[in-house]
Amino acid sequence: MTELQTKNESLLFKWKQAPSFIKASILLHVALLICLVIVPALWHWWLAVFLANHLVISLVGLWPRSTWLGPNWTRLPPAAILRNEIALTIDDGPEPAVTRPVLDILDRYQVKATFFYIGNKVAQHPELCREIVTRGHAIENHSQHHSVFFSMFGYTKMMIEILAAQETLQRITGKRPTFFRAPAGLRNPFLDPILKKLGLHLASWSVRGFDTRVNDAEKVKAKLIKGLCPGAIILLHDGNAAITPANEPVIVAVLPALLEAAKAKGLRCVTLAEAAN
């Protein structure tokens, strides 16, 4: 097989793997180029359509639970739903002062959680992260630096950021992540091909209580409990956690009642990796 044939097959594979929305955008770009060549006098119309398409792509990237840019776990798979499973996911740590009481609560209720952690913070608290894994929880990839500009990264910079976190988490925990959650859930079309290349699944959430901004534990608790149902992916934070007026991290304040409510509904907490089986 020639090098040209190999490249053509690789491009064809990437095209087949691309999300339908991205395929449609690529075809639109081709059509606009043809229109520009045939009717150049209407260039301003072709430019307007081009800009509108890119605006839609940007807006989709700002929609964390969207599947238009590629597969995205917003709920657990059907088999997990039939087993009455839910997934508790905890982001932005580790943060020892918050993470340790969270771990104690999880132990008390015999619940396993998935922690989406930031690579450089994991490197600062390696023993705590190893303890999390030893206790039976999972640590997954939440990027190396959690940059607020993550969704603006190009392919190379995004790949470096995700791969750095993969290497950091594997080196410290001994386990290579299989799930990725984008910082704040924001992304762009470069993310899906990177995740496919690294063998990672994108995961967002079903319900969140905005516990990094809302310091009223009762409001957060009510929103989370309302969303409890088979297949739910719940989002909480041990990093950047809001603090209640009683000077308690919101996640610590709401977690016992949330787990009690899940138990009363016959729901079983599993890690994302367990739900995939």
Image: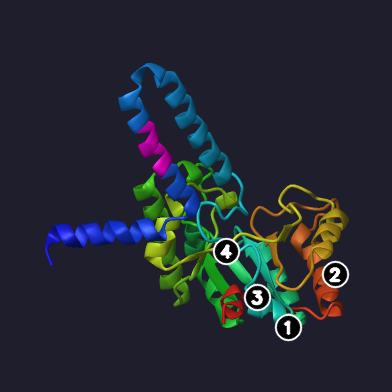
Q: Position of residue 222 (x, y in %)?
A: 86, 59
Q: Which residue is mark 2?
A: 257
Residue 260 seen in render: yes
Q: Which residue is mark 4?
A: 116
Q: Determine if the magenta segment contains residue 128.
A: no
Disc 1 marks a residue whose amino acid type is: Gln
Mark linked to residue 78: 3
Nearer to me, 238 or 58: 58
Q: Position of residue 21 (x, y in %)?
A: 50, 49
Nearer to me, 13 or 155: 13
Mark linked to residue 110: 1
Q: Tag 2, which secondary structure? A: helix
Crowding at mark 1 (Cα within 10 Å: few <14, some 14-19, many 20+)? few
Q: Is residue 178 above or below residue 247?
A: below
Numbered range of the magenta stretch: 27-33
Mark toward the start of the polypeptide (2 vs 1) = 1
Contact between marks 2 and 3 (CB within 8 A): the answer is no
